[in-house]
Amino acid sequence: MAESIITGESLFINIRSLIEESRKRVAVTVNNELTLLYWNVGNLIQQEILRYERAGYGQQVVKKLSEDLMKQYGKGWSLRHLYNCIKFRDVFPDVQIVHTLCTQLSWSHLRVLMGIEDELKRGFYVEICMMERWTVKLLLERIDSMLYERTAISKKPELTIKNDLQKLKNEGKTTPELVFRDPYFLDFLGLKDTYSEKDLESAIISELQRFIQEIGTDFAFIERQKRIVIDRRDYYVDLLFYHRRLKALVAIELKLGEFKAEYKDKMELYLSWLEKNETIEGESPPIGLILCAGKHYEHVELLQLHKSNIKVAEYLTMLPPKDVLLEKFHQAIELARSQIDVRGKDRE
């Protein structure tokens, strides 16, 4: 009797698994078909409207079409939905690209992405969303947290951004500029008023899943307080991670105050030791991330950290108003790009 019960449970689990997998495949197929349908609808409307140049003709066509479709197929074909179809075709005019997108992104994802007017910014979210398999909710959170503005790539020249996104799209190759951010939002740690570096580290460990979600899902946690012995002296790396796509160890140092020049020397020592003793064949050289409560850009610029494998970023445990953050990001982007231009002229 017991054996038959166990067999029955096992059979139920196996059949449930088949049903769930089948449902997933059906959902993907339905999403693909609907997304392509919406693109084709938008394309046909555009072709019809472009035949005529009379003022207001397009609005009349779309309004009448919506009324007819809703009578036949229901409220899903509202005026708003038809304009979404038109915008979808405008934003993604190449149907072959749409074929690729709809295998990985839902119509809900694409509606959110269509709302991003800046082409480079939209391209960034498209590629990272597919790479990290974000839900629609997470995509909205990432846009709301201004992830693009916080990522180093946003501070590069437009041609560099295009090339890096193209490599990610075509070859799956990412760069540190696409991975590392500044600042990092650590408001979820719940740190108030005064706290120590140990408190900060402990809070990160206790909220490790959310911390990894903030820094990027390709990060894998390895060790806390990684012990390094050099000339019989002990040193400790606060947090050691591994980045799967960069194929590199990432040493993270946590600092309560502003960035200081001496932090660079210590991180260089850690990275040299890790490269000598921990890096295995096929991996890239280790990367260092110094997380500080603040930094001065001239310090970072004069130390020429852009030539090294060391990144310096701020972290925020409490978020200021969004307009203040946005202004700060725009200033940082303009400053970084102007410094790139100056370095380029110096080389000429």
Image (cartoon, rainbow, N blue to C red):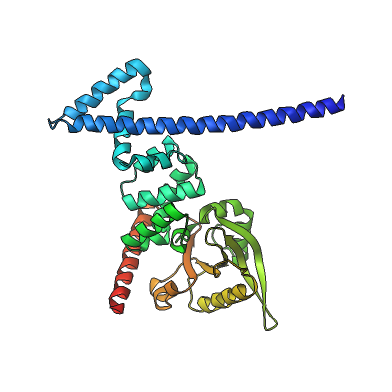
Closer to the camera, 154 or 49? Answer: 49
The image shows residue 199 at horizontal and vertical percentages of 62, 62
Closer to the camera, 111 or 131? Answer: 131
The count of marks equals 0
Q: In the displayed image of the protein, which residue is found farthest to the bottom? A: 231
- Hey, which quadrant is residue 242 in on the image? bottom right
The image shows residue 47 at horizontal and vertical percentages of 23, 32
Residue 284: tell me if it is visible.
yes
- Decide: is 67 above or below 321: above
- Decide: is 347 above or below 324: below
Q: Residue at x 64, y 61 (%)?
A: 222
> In this rendering, would 333 be left or right of 58?
right
Residue 255: tell me if it is visible.
no
- Hey, which quadrant is residue 335 in on the image? bottom left
**Placement of the N terminus among the 4 image quadrants:** top right
- Hey, which quadrant is residue 192 in on the image? bottom right
> In this rendering, would 56 be left or right of 319?
left
Q: Residue at x 54, y 77 (%)?
A: 268
The image shows residue 208 at horizontal and vertical percentages of 61, 54
> In this rendering, would 289 be left or right of 234?
left
- Decide: is 77 above or below 343: above
- Decide: is 210 above or below 69: below
The image shows residue 141 at horizontal and vertical percentages of 46, 46
Q: In the displayed image of the protein, which residue is found farthest to the top? A: 71
Closer to the camera, 248 or 93? Answer: 93
